[in-house]
Image (cartoon, helix red, strand yellow):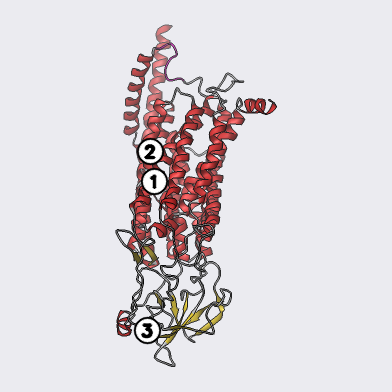
Amino acid sequence: MGARFCVWEFSRTTAGFLMAIGFTTIIHGMTINGITSVNVSTIERRFHFESILSGIVASAYDITSCLICPLITYYGRKLHKPRMISAGMVVFVSGCITSALPHFVSEAYEPLHNLNDSGLCVDNYTREDVNGDLSFSRIPLVLFLIGNILLGVGTAPILTFSLTYIDDNTTEGKSASYIGIIGGCSSIGTVCGYLLGGYSLSFFVHPGGNTAGISQQDPTWIGNWWAPFVLSSIMAVVCIFLLLQFPKTLHRTNGNLSGDNNSVVDQNTSDDAAGERKVYRFSTSVTALLKNRMFLFTIIASGLECFLLNGFSVFLSKFLQNRFMVSPTAASLLAGGVSVPGAACGQVAAGYTVRKFKVKIRGILRLACILTVITGLLNFNMLLYCPGLVHKESENCRSEMKCECDHKIYRPVCGEDGIDYFSACHAGCKRVSEDQAGLSSSDYGYWNKNEHTIDPAVTTTSLNVYSPCHQVFEACSCIRSNNSMVGSARTGTCQKHCDKLVPFLILLFFTILLSFSVTNLSVLAVMRCVEPDLKSFAIGIHWFAIRVIGSIPSPLIIGYVFDASCEVWMRGKGEGEFCWTYNNASFSRSVILMAATVKVLSFGCFAVAYRRCGTLGQMRNKVQQKQLQSLSNRDNSSQ
C-alpha cells in the first residue's frame, strides 16, 4: 500500500515526469544515436551490405520521423500525452526487436569457410564453396528497414509530446530548464550507446559459439551487435510502465503557466470555427515564413551544416576503423568520447556567448559566417590518416603455380618485401613455418622492409593486429627475397606505426564543437528573425528542413563515397557484397571536395541572411513608426 502511494505521488509531480521522460530519452539516444552507429560496419560484414544500403537504412528512420511528427502533433494534441508517449514506446520496442531479428532468422555465422583449410597454395586443389556465410539475403535488409521505420514512428511522440507536456504543466522559467535537462539526457544516452555497443562487439556474435581461434581484430570477426537492441527493448518496457502512471494533466500549483497566456483560439469559440481559424492561420503562417528571406536562407544553411554532422555521425565508428586500423570496440569508444562532448560544448558555448555579450541577430549571423569558414578549414583534417593496405597483384605468379585461391575470404599477410597480399595463397606460400607457427600477439611484429626481418621494436597493439593465430608462411613463390627466389610472409598487415590518430581526434573535436555552435546560432537566428507568434511554427519548419536537407540525404551520399573508394570487395552468391578495405587517399579527396562544397553553400546562405537582416530591420522600424503614428493620430482625434 505504501509503495503504491509513493508511485501515485511520483506520477503527480513535474519532477516525477521529468525523471521518467529523462530515462526514456536516455534509451532513445542510446539506441538511435549510439548503438545504431556503432553497429554499421559489423552489420555490413555480417550481412554483406554495401555502405549505401546502410545509408538507406539510416535514412528510413529520419524519413519516417519527418513524416509522422506533423500527423502525431496535429491529431494527438488533445489526447492523453503520457499515454501517447507510452504507445510510441510500444512501437519503439517493436522496432528494437525487429532490428535484432536478422540474427535469429539467418544462418549461424562461421568465421572461416572451412576450418580445415590452411589457406596455402596447393596445386590442383578445389576448395569448398561458401553457402551460408557469403550468400546474400534480402530478409535482413527488409527487417532492418522495418525496424528503423518502427523506431521512427515510436520516436515521434517522444520528441514532441514530452516537451509540450512539460511546457503545459510548469511555469515558463522552469520549462526552459526542464527542456534543457531532457536534451542533456539525450547526450548521456548517446554516450551509453557508444559504450554499450562497443563493449558488446568485443564478444562473438554467437555467445559460446566457435570463434575458430580468431580475435576481434581479425577482419572476419563479427561482434555481438544484436544484444544491445534486446537490452534497449527491455529497458523501454520499464519506461512504458512508468509513463502510464501519469495523468492527462498534472496538478497545477501555479496558475501562471507557460501556455496559458498565449492560446491561439478563444475558449468560447466553437470547434468548427476554431478549425477554420487554424487552417487560415496555418496557410498564412507558411506564406509569411516563406516570404521571409532571412528565415529561408538561415534554415537552408542550418540544413547544410547538419548534412555533414548527421552523415558522419552514422559512419564515424566505421570511419575510424578503416582510416586508423582500430578495432570496432576502440572505434566506438573514440567516436563517443569525441563527438558527444564536442556537441555538448558547442551548444553551450554558443548560447553562453550570445547571452553573455548580448549579441543581436546581425551579430549572430556574422558569428555563424565566421565559424562556418573556420570549420571549413578544419575539414582538411581529413588529410590525416594512416596508410592503407597496398595489395600486390600476383595473378600471373599464382597462375604459374596453379594455386586455387579463395577470393571471398580476406586473410591478409605481409610479405618480407613489405607488400600486403590478400591471403597466404595469393602470395604463393606452400607451407607454414614449424618453429614460428602459433606465435602469440605479444611477439608479433611488422616486417622491416629494408632489413627483411621482424622488427621487435615496432610491435602491434590490440588496435591494429589482423591475425587469428599469427602464423609465419614459407616458400612463398610470389615474394622475392634477397637471398632466394622465394620469400616468407606473416599473417597481418605491413602497416607501420601511425601517430596521426591523436591529432585527428583533437581537430575532429574542435570541428564538431564549432559546427554545433553554428547549428545552435542558427536556431537563435530563426527565433529572432520571425514574428513572436510564429516562433514555434518557425522552429518546426527549421526542424523539418534539417531532416530534408541534412539527415535524410547525407547517409546515402556518404555511404556512396565509402563504396566508391573501396579497394577490396567481397562478392558472394546472389547480389550481396561488402568492402574489406578502402583507399584512404581517394576517400579523403572525395570528402574534402564534398565538405568544401557544402561549406561554401552554407556560408553563402548565412551571408545572404546577414544582408537581409538589415532590410528586415528597416521594414520593422517602418512598421513601428506607422503604428506609433496611428496611435498618435488616434489620441489626437479622441481629444
User: Which of the two discs, 1 and 3, labels the residue nearer the N terminus?
Assistant: 3
Residue 390 visible somewhere in the drawing: yes
Answer yes or no: is residue 550 visible. Answer: no
For label 1, the residue is 551
Mark toward the viewer: 2 or 3: 3
Q: Tag 1: Cα neighbours inside 10 Å, few (<14), some, or many (≥20)?
A: many
Q: Helix, strand or loop at disc 3? A: loop
Foreground tag (1 vs 3): 3
Q: Are marks 2 and 1 in contact (CB under 8 Å)?
A: yes
**Mark 2, residues whose alpha carbon is within 10 Å: few (<14), some, or many (≥20)?**
many
- For disc 3, the marked residue is 478
Q: Nearer the viewer, residue 52 or 387?
A: 52
Above or below, comparing residue 50 to residue 286 in the picture: below
The magenta segment = 263-269
Secondary structure found at label 1: helix
Task: For marks 1 and 3, give the CA distance.
Answer: 48 Å
Is residue 611 covered in magenta? Answer: no
- Type of amino acid at the residue the image marks with label 3: Cys
Q: Position of residue 174 (x, y in %)?
A: 58, 30
Q: Against 514, is 538 above or below?
A: above
Measuring 55% from the left and 54% from the top, which residue is drawn there? 337
SS at mark 2? helix
Mark 2 vs 1, N-terminal side: 2
Instruction: Please tell me whether residue 264 belongs to the stretch shown in magenta.
Output: yes
According to the image, label 2 marks what residue?
66
Kindly indicate the quadrant of the structure image that contains residue 414: bottom left
